[in-house]
Image (cartoon, rainbow, N blue to C red):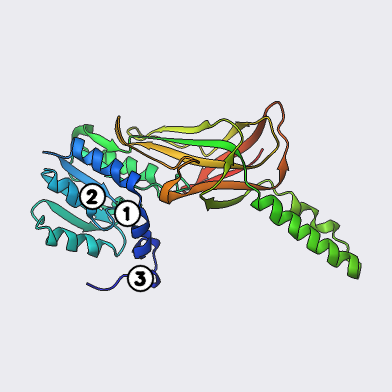
Amino acid sequence: MEELGPDELAQWTDPWEHIRLLSDEQRNGALVGFLRRHAAGKRLLEIGCGAGVWSCLAAKLGATKVYAVEQSATVEVAREMVVRNGLQDRVEVIASDIHALEPRAVDIAFMELQNADPFVEGVVGAARVARTWLEGGQGLIAPRRMRVLAAAAEVKEGVEETQRAQADLARLAESVGLDLIALDPLWRPHWPYRFVGNKTQIVGPAIDIFDLDLTTDVQVPEEIVVAIPTEDPISAIVVWFEAELDDEARFSNPPDRPGHWGLLQCGFAHVVEPQDGRVEVVVSVEDDEFALRLA
Ligand SMILES: C[S@@+](CC[C@H](N)C(=O)[O-])C[C@H]1O[C@@H](n2cnc3c(N)ncnc32)[C@H](O)[C@@H]1O
């Protein structure tokens, strides 16, 4: 087998991406539990099988057929997994983007396309494709529901960076007599500094931004206004997901336990004062990317 490496390009060809997600016991446990409860005697589709662990597990647990679809070069690892486990009669590894395939008939379609940005791995579009694989529209899609939540938070990076930039330039301006008024628009951007981190301090209650039923032809609204509750001035809003596989299993990266996904943090350049106990933001999802800005 050829060695995989990051310079072969795509993120998912980098072994470290797979090591990272396979290190997340809680995530793995959700997949194991789901497959233990549902795989036996069923035909499955895994969208984005990565190294093939879960497709092979499904077959070991009694699935009669598994289509393991993977778009990146890691598909070769999945092929090797299947051969070494003697599962060629039941697991068919397909090197492709799921969107390019003709549907086969399955009873269950499952995927782990979560990310700190809940949309960036295309879970909504993939779930839409998954429905076309379910014979007679009957069967399970996992995740079946995805909530996207947000809360006001204390994250100082954006504010501190802005203050450092202003202070340093003010010193320069004073020493050489430079007028910095033209820079004013720079210091008050309405869109936040987006980054993925693990630690944050929530200062308001969590609210649902989206609650998507992935078993339907769900459409994500392109732009909505959301009121984030807070009594205190805030420097950031954090966003996370809860993706429900079945009654018992879910993928989630809440602020107190973001797991390997990390937490999407949207930090403002300045402290934002709430009006009537809330900060209004405009949320949009375009080309599978989540964005948030002050209304
Ligand atoms: C988060 S990883 C999960 C890998 C594996 N299922 C696991 O849970 O260990 C997502 C995988 O899905 C693959 N993927 C993403 N979008 C895909 C698509 N449209 N078609 C096929 N594979 C896709 C990526 O290349 C990546 O390997």
**Cα–Cα gap, marks 1 and 2:** 11 Å
Which amino acid type is marked by label 1?
Answer: Leu
Instruction: Kindly state the secondary structure of the residue where label 2 is placed.
Output: helix
Residue 256 image position (x, y, % from top left): 49, 40
Residue 16 image position (x, y, % from top left): 37, 63
Which quarter of the figure has residue 137? top left
Disc 2 residue: CB within 8 Å of ligand 1: yes
Q: Around disc 1, counting alpha carbons within 10 Å, would you say few (fewer than 14), some (14 to 19), or many (20 or more)? A: some
In this image, 177 relative to 249: left or right?
right
Closer to the chain start, of discs 1 and 2, is 1
At horizontal 58% and vertical 51% (from top left) the residue drawn is 194
Nearest the camera: 32 or 132?
32
Closer to the chain start, of discs 1 and 3, is 3
Which residue is denoted by mark 3 in the rendering?
Answer: 5
Task: Give the quarter of the figure containing the N terminus.
Answer: bottom left
Please identify, in this view, whether the residue under mark 1 or under mark 3 is nearer the observer: 1
Task: Give the quarter of the figure containing the C terminus.
Answer: top right
Disc 1 residue: CB within 8 Å of ligand 1: yes
- Does residue 96 sit above or below 285 in this rendering? below
Which amino acid type is marked by label 3?
Answer: Gly
Residue 72 image position (x, y, % from top left): 31, 61
Q: Are discs 3 and 2 less than 8 Å apart at CB?
A: no
Q: Around disc 3, counting alpha carbons within 10 Å, would you say few (fewer than 14), some (14 to 19), or many (20 or more)? A: some
Residue 2 image position (x, y, % from top left): 25, 73
Which residue is denoted by mark 2 in the rendering?
Answer: 54
Which residue is denoted by mark 1 in the rendering?
Answer: 22
Instruction: Kindly state the secondary structure of the residue where label 1 is placed.
Output: helix
